[in-house]
Amino acid sequence: MKKNSDKDRKKAESLLARMSLDEKIRQMAGHGGLHSALPFTYTLAPYPTPDNKRLKISGLIFTDGPRGINLGKSTCFPVAIARGATWDPELETRVGHAMGLEARSRGANALGAVCVNVVRHPSWGRSQETFGADPCHIGVMGAALTTGLAQNVMPVIKHFACNSIENSRFKVNVQVDERTLREIYLPHFKKCIDAGAACVMTAYNRVNGNFCGQNNHLINHILKGEWAFDGFVMSDFLLGCRNTAMSLNAGLDMEMPQRFFYSKVAIKRSMAEGKISLDTINKAVARILLQKVRFGLTGEGEVKTGRGPKIHPALALEAARKSMVLLKNQDRALPLERGKIKSIAVIGKLAGLANMGAIGSTQVNPPYSVSPLEGLKNKAMGIEIRHCPWKGGRFKKALDLAHRADAAIVFAGLTRYDEGEYFPFICGGDRKSLELPRNQEDLILSVAKVAKKVIVVLQGGGAIACGAWIDHVDGLIMAWYPGMEGGNAIAEVLLGDVNPSGKLPLSFPVSTDQLPEFDCKARQATYDYWHDYRYFDHMGVQPLFPFGFGLSYTRFTYSDLRIEQDRIGPEVKIAVSFDVTNTGKQAGEETAQIYVGFKNSSIDPRSHKELKGFGKCLLQPGETKTLNVEIQGKDLGYYCEADRSWKVEQMVYSVYVGASARDIHLTGSFRII
Ligand code: BGC
């Protein structure tokens, strides 16, 4: 979908000029959205704002995201963090395009699928909804999804900002200094804005004392002011808006999903009291109308339904295949080759479950789903598959089965009851520990004692600490919540039909206590400069699996780093090129990461290194390809609080090219003068 043109602006202005105050106010809030209060009713219907029949303006019809759309029987894609593990923005744009088509064909015109909050700590219960822990990576993936969605629906980007604690999301005050806010928690939102976001949803929490839905600094100053965002700003649902005048004056244009504070009575009262001006109302409505014009919701030319397939199983399968991360493969334990392996013991109740992630706003009800057990049976072709759905209690049956088979696969991990959007006493919430439940760890260790070969397949929406048992297993795959085709993708990777290429979009610690404490009940939380690989680098600590890590059934080498600058000064563009060669025996895809190091910096704090770009290539055995990645000088800057501006230091910067944050193959440098 095109961005706004002057013609669109004129049309929006003319509609605004023809509206009465009552009509304007009706544009500014939802109606009939109370079913968002419970997880089981969430997906029953979309969340509308009223039509204006007189002026032929359609209301918004909002539905949610991010692993597919909430309505009807729709494609359940792998969760966003799994898609983050693909490091594949081109694929993500296709996923966005498909989600937009499905949303349109079910009557919706706005989709809250682009969650780009940073996983500041992996205990965050909603980690599965975002792409990972790094602002550069999240920004690229979020922008790709936004681009795809915008071809059919209004992309809604959320939750602005610093929303990374779930259980206390309605009350926690995030204390964050301006530099950390600008460098760690906001840049990816800006990338989504530049990619064509129509709407930004604010977060529930406070930032530096003010609720995000009434945070003048975040909305008016940064988003609408500095970034010149010309879309509109919507509240998160029910408790996202708490005060008519404070929210409106801070720049919140729309209350969702119900009109409590943006009702006719409340707004007119605030106007009569002199707390809000007509100009503020006009500006808010103008923004909403501009996006409605852009997306064909005004008058003739209105697009109510998109054309295209109703579901996208092939795309869901492709995304699931590419999201699988091979974390350990001792002595080439994987793949389980059909000629060599005659029987597999499949252990754990998660094997028999199509485990698709949290419920509530992210729930998708697909037309069908494939569990890992079904996937293995579908693809076994002669291998005997026997399942023990161990659900707790004694392990005897599972161990007998494991002992007799050529290989045992233990399916372990989390479900919607362990993490996700928090509905007290029902499901979801933050995680208290990053380890697997104790009985699952014991099961893995017991199976490892008796099996000839033991492979663990993990499911979950974030990092799982495997330090207690990793040395005892031969193979480990992180499968996330892999969507409705997940079972097939898992089987294909296990059996070697697909060569795994996913890489972690966040670090996996050895154990929970390797990280700072996470208080899910916090009323106050300080977000400092350090998290994920920046934290591990800063503390000199080795995670179990670093950010960006993922193995393949083949091997890659890196060579011939070239670094070129097109000019002198901070506006410089740095072209980084290098070669990647597949030195193994089968085709495979590699994601190479480019980090920039700041060891010469005089600014404190400054990261040891930061991801500044990445590239992906598919290589046949023996093949070499050149990857080219461009780094913009402005992306090397730090935010100077004293001058309230971005500055690029004049110094020598290091370049690290590698297969993960801790597996650097090539180093170089460039100077900015
Ligand atoms: C969630 C948002 C979601 C909204 C509407 C809220 O509870 O925090 O992520 O977009 O509901 O579904």
Image: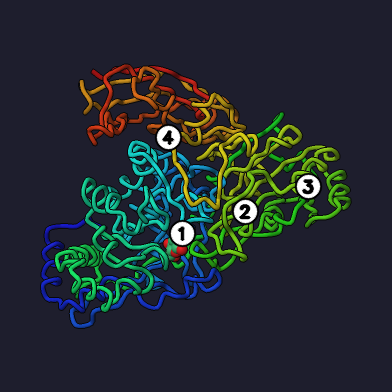
Q: Is residue 147 above or below residue 561?
A: below
- Specify the amino acid type for callout 3: Ile
User: Mark number for residue 488?
Assistant: 2
The residue carrying pointer 1 sits among few (fewer than 14), some (14 to 19) or many (20 or more) residues within 10 Å by Cα, namely some
Q: Residue furthest bottom?
A: 54
Q: CA distance from mark 4 to mark 3?
A: 46 Å
Q: Which residue is mark 3?
A: 344
Q: Is residue 6 above or below residue 658?
A: below
Q: Are marks 2 and 3 in contact (CB under 8 Å)?
A: no
- Specify the amino acid type for callout 4: Tyr
Q: Are marks 2 and 1 in contact (CB under 8 Å)?
A: no
Q: Is residue 377 visible?
A: yes
- Specify the amino acid type for callout 2: Asn
Q: How is the image coloured?
A: rainbow
Q: Is mark 4 within 8 Å of ligand 1?
A: no
Q: Are marks 4 and 3 in contact (CB under 8 Å)?
A: no
Mark closer to the observer (4, 2): 4
Q: Quadrant of ligand 1?
A: bottom left
User: Mark number for residue 170?
Assistant: 1
Tag 3's secondary structure?
strand
First along the sequence among labels 4 and 3: 3
Indicate left or right for 476 with 155 as reference: right
Indicate left or right for 137 with 151 as reference: right
- Specify the amino acid type for callout 1: Phe
Q: Is mark 1 within 8 Å of ligand 1?
A: no
Q: Which residue is mark 4?
A: 529
Q: Between residue 65 and residue 322, name the one nearer to us.
A: 65
Residue 254 horizontal/vertical position (percent)? 30, 66
Residue 64 horizontal/vertical position (percent)? 43, 64
Residue 102 horizontal/vertical position (percent)? 42, 66
